[in-house]
Image (cartoon, helix red, strand yellow):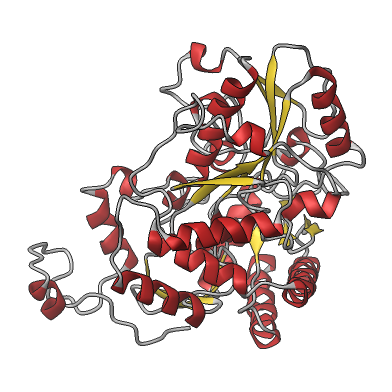
Amino acid sequence: MTGTIPFCDETACARAGCTATVCRGAGMPSNQQFFDRSARVIPGGVNSSIRAFKAVGGTPYVVSRAQGAFVYDVEGNELIDLVQSYGAIILGHAHPKVTEAIRTAAGDGTSYGAPTPREMKLAEAISERVPSCERVRFMNSGTEATSTAVRLARGATGRKRIVTFHGNFHGATDALLAAGGSGVATLGLPGTAGVPDEAVANTWVLPYNVVPTLDNDVAAVFVEPVAANMGLVAPAAGFLEGLRAECDRVGALLVFDEVITGFRLGTGGAQAKYDVRPDLTCFGKVIGGGLPIGAVGGRRDIMENLTPLGSVFHAGTLAGNPLATAAGLAALNELNADVYMELMARARRASALLRDACVDAGIAAQFPVVGTLVGMYFGDALHRAPTNFEEAKTTNESLYAQVFHALLSGGVALAPGAYEAVFVGLSHTDAVLDQLADRVATALKGIAR
């Protein structure tokens, strides 16, 4: 499982002007050394809380590089990557078309603070593929996209109340952090410190997969059309259609958070798969080809409430960044119907091999599949896939931690939290999945013993 990928040595450190003593003269430093060094300058040693391994214990692996379906840590260990930057990487790490697009764009300059042809072309590509997105505005993250969508929905309707669902995660936006899945669930928090009561006073958090009765104070309903932050929970029959009808009844906006599902489930995302047209859609992940980006798309009459045409403010110096839009366009141009068919087949195979290895090891687990997404649920509290957050929360987090570390030691990287999805991509070829099956089976037998 070991490669030859030195990341830092005494010569390189000296050349970079590094004066730290933690790894100088020690040859190839360890994950622990890098993490300890990071913790002295970065809170908790990480720039996204879930990376800290708090939910599973231990020390994070520190990635030095990645290629295709693999990541390599600073110790030279090769890991089959089932995280894929939490879904942002769909073609595989360092895909040649994406890296070439970035190189070309970087040669033209990295940021202008002015309109560019690349942002126009990516907006056109999104609008062509997702008919509900008559207009598209770029920003720098999925969180910024959902935050902008909240402000836009309130500004366009003149109403205050926002409806969300238990276990849906819409990024680090105050109004949407009343309760959520993924990182918030992993950390065992109902929301977060630092968000005052008044910030969520106009947020209703309701059960997922139950169509609520709305009133005329509701500005918008935010929903993950496929909930991918509480394991993986598919929408119940009629749920999304019911939300559309109820929003129409009271004049509220329906907002699909497709930061994960957008261009991951298919060309048109979840809204195409389930044939439900939202008023606004939030994007991230895939549309940046691995670089930071976010976007809000939607009906022309709503989107034109944004400044400079309307009165709902949005701005960002790096919004529509030429590198991110170049990478995103390169990624989207590689995705077609045949690719999605292949990705769905690979997701089903990954689910089956994980399930079979768990069965052989006597580990109770389920790996539901929705299109190209694979979920995880551990324990025998449920004998079917979860349908809401209360059921998803019965997953055995302690058992997941054991599985996580067994696989990590065996050369397979999962997300360090029990509420994330498994992501397979174009680089997870049959040969890679054969390797995955062998590594998983061997690792889990160790738990059984």
Residue 176, position in %: x, y?
57, 28
Image quarter (top left, top right, bottom left or bottom right) of the C terminus: bottom right
Compared with residue 66, is residue 147 higher up or lower down, i.e. above or below?
Answer: above
Q: Nearer the viewer, residue 377 or 227?
A: 227
Place of residue 144 in the rendered image (x, y in percent of width and height, measured from the top left): 48, 39
The answer to whether residue 152 is left or right of residue 344 is: left
- Residue name at image x 33 percent, y 73 percent: 74
Position of residue 394 measured from the top left corner of the image (x, y, whole percent): 73, 39
Residue 57 in the image, given as x and y percentages of width and height = 47, 51
Task: From the viewer's side, name the closer residue of 15 and 446.
Answer: 15
Can residue 145 be seen by looking at this rendering? yes
Query: Does residue 86 appear anywhere in the picture?
Result: no
User: For this view, does 202 lie left or right of residue 328?
Assistant: right
Is 121 rendered above or below residue 163? below
Taking the image as shown, residue 406 lies to the left or right of residue 132, namely left
Residue visible at 30% across and 57% down in the picture: 111
**Number of numbered discs present?**
0
Q: Residue at x 85, y 49 (%)?
A: 274
Residue ID at (77%, 72%): 337
Whether 210 is drawn above or below 126: the answer is above
**Image: 205 above or below 444:** above
Return the residue found at the far front. Answer: 309
Outermost residue toward the right in this view: 237
Of residues 144 and 204, the one nearer the viewer is 144
- Splitting the image into 4 quarters, where does residue 161 fall? top right
- Residue 344, quarter of picture: bottom right
Tell which of 296 and 306 is nearer to you: 306
